[in-house]
Amino acid sequence: MTAAPEPRAAARPGLRRRLAGDQNRTLWFWAFVGPFFLGLLVFVYVPMGWSIWLSFYEARNTVTPTVFVGLDNYRDMLTDPAFLSSLGTFVVFAAFIVPLTLAVSLGLALMLNRVGVLRTFFRSVYFLPTACSYVVGALIWKLSIFNGVRFGLANTLMRAVGIEPVAWLSVTQPPWYWLVIVSLRLWLQVGFFMILFLAGLQRIPPVLYEAAAVDGAKPGWQTFRYITFPQLRATSVAILVLLLINAFQAFDEFYNLLANAGASGGGGYPPYARPPLVYLYYIALGNQQDFGHGSAGAVILAALIAVVTVLQAKFLGFGRRGDQ
Amino acid sequence: MVLPHAPIRTPPSTDSSWSRRRFLQTGSGLAAAGLLAACGSNTGREGATTVAAAGSGTGAATKPTLSQWYHQYGEAGTQQAVERYAAAYPDATVSVQWSPGDYDKKVAAALLTDSGPDVFEAGNGPSIDQIQSGQVVELTGILGDAAGDFTPSLIERMTWQGKLYGVPQVIDMQLLVYRKSLLEAAGLQPPTTFDELEAAAAALTTADVKGLFVGNDGGAGVLPGPVMWSVGADYLTADNQIGFTDPLVAEALGRLHGLFTSGSLLLGAPADWSDPSALVDGLTAMQWTGLWTLPALQEGLGDDFGVLPWPAYSATVGAGSVPIGAYGSAVSAKSTNPDAAKAFVKYLWVDRTEDQIDWAQSYGFHIPARTSLADQAEGLKSGPAADAVTLVEQNGHAQTPLLWTPASGTALSDAVTRIIKDGSDPAAEMATVAQTVQAELDRVAG
């Protein structure tokens, strides 16, 4: 019996080929993704890691501290009334802006979806504010529309109907500043979420509406209630998650609308409308330069966002197989 | 840049994959070059030396390079002036960085790195945290024989434990400006007490003009100091203890809530208190603002305005007051050549007296930090400017003391905001502020 010859081992590809991957796919992947990944690493992950490290140190006016304080910075932040108050400000803001943006963007999307002519024009009109900087938007709102003098746009309109001018951004009773803040963000972001809803609407098979019509469903609310809205479930849940994260990260409009020319060695910004990022900015990047407490607050905030997002997604069923 | 190993000229090729590879090689090279360039941001110093400027008389001698930072001043010509002063300095090549926006925060962040300034200006001098963390160089002795000529309160404000950390550049002050014609028409005298100010604000308020403007925040940002001084109290005592525990402070702050809700205050003006436009545009009859607005006020109102201190609390309690402050020139501890930086600071703010007068007087109304130069300033010898100088001498208080940290300032500002806008209990609010301030004093003063 003659032994069968050993099957010839497949030739092992060279190191260069293995690194480049089949058809150079790995090479091309890193060529295109690499620069962005590098940026992410340098400008996001390294600062995040550094921030976590700083949060365990006494770090005033230095980012290379030597005094380890353990969890003291976390304890201080969790018992700091101003930080807790900033979280309360977020809750109020989110309570206004999240449902309002959801409703308005959905309403606009439904309206545009039915528009027969000039659909692209109207879509552009509503989407354009998205391209506007929050800072620019805040200045327009603060200086032109909602300034407190008689010739501000809002006050001019109010005087025309016999209502006295209002100092929109200066008074807290009643808190008109919320109207200014919420309307600004609504104007800036509603176009983006409207586009997402439009995409969702256009994915709904027309056959569903046809079948419903055959079964006697009335167009309008009944169709919306039983077909459109359920079909938009995945889109709505994703938008809710995005809106809540966006609300947590509110900074520009608060800072630019309500900053004052303070001169008492601090402040220059009122405590009643200071969301978490503005407060952390004051501690860490403002004149205080307290990177230890600022970093601890940032870690707490990041953890809070993560927990709330996960709970929200779980509660709403975000990413369920049926939604895909 | 020539890429290593890349052919200088390549023949045309129809091989598309080669073209892509070549494109990526070039792109990678450019990206690397960009990163390297970004890493070496130009701070104007880099430890390099430069050939001396023509006319310096040293021919091929070398001299250090320095970076000097300023915040953006509003008056026309100020940037050109500081660039001219820097260019004239014979012993170093100085690049000036003129910073719009939030200068203080930009400097604070830059001082953490090696790419910050060598010389920079700081509002009221470097902060106590910058001093204690070793971010600035001690400047003791730099004033030389001129030490006694500088305004003592400014030198004290920039001194910690007997060591000087900033050289005052120029004095600024805040004050109350009023329209003479409007007060005369209403039969009012310039107010000297808070009651009179409150009454005047009410009397001067019409459908189109408010009586008083103290900032869009109702004075929360700028009035805490003047209100404390108006009852004879202060942020801190001379021995750095809490100075605002007098119940009269809470009472006086509580009166601001009445003013806020009286309808006499201008609120929500397009430009805040530091800009004269509310007064010039006829939105208000009286405004709390700064000395720097006097040229614009003269241009807009002619002689129809006068200046006052923040009034005393009453005819028997306290006195009128104005806050005075000064930008101080400081040297970063991360400077690669601190001796050259200190020499430049001395040249500019101690030796060059003609430039100091030019800086103080040619682009707006400021008071030179040195008494002898203030006496020579022609622009300060008549009219409201002369009155303002008198206010500085008779009613001036350092804007905030050195040990008044940003955390203390934020605590006070927050409390005063709640008192003014919400009518919160002033005594309770000030007691909370005292806790924060005491913790800060314990931290920085031991």
Image: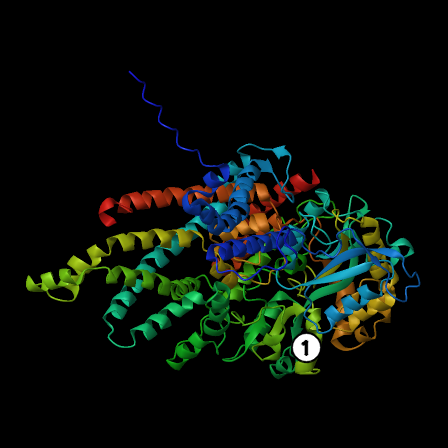
Residue B52, given in percent of the width and then of the height, sits at: 86, 61
Task: Please provide percent x and percent y for residue B338.
Answer: 80, 49
Q: Is mark 1 on a helix, strand or loop?
A: helix
Kindly indicate the quadrant of the structure image that contains residue B378.
bottom right
Q: What residue type is labelled 1?
A: Ala
Tally of numbered discs: 1
Determine whether, in the image, residue A92 is placed left or right of residue B405: left
Left or right, A320 with respect to B172, comes to left
Q: Which chain carries label 1?
A: B
Which residue is rendered at x = 59% and y = 74% of the image? B200
Q: Given the current orientation, which residue lies at the most extreme left position?
A: A215
Image-quadrant location for residue B440: top right
Q: Which residue lies furthest to the right in this view?
A: B57
Residue A61, relative to residue B384: is it above or below?
Answer: above
Please indicate whether residue B347 sits to the left or right of residue A229 in the image: right
Query: How is the model colour-coded?
Result: rainbow
Residue at 62% from the left image edge and 42% from the top image edge: A63
Of residue B359 and residue B284, the one placed in the foreground of this image is: B359
Q: Is residue B310 above or below residue B381?
A: above
> Could one spot residue B179 in this view of the protein?
yes
Residue nearest the observer in this picture, B21 or A174: B21
Q: Is residue B374 visible?
A: no
Residue corresponding to mark 1: B296
Is B116 rendered above or below residue B438? below
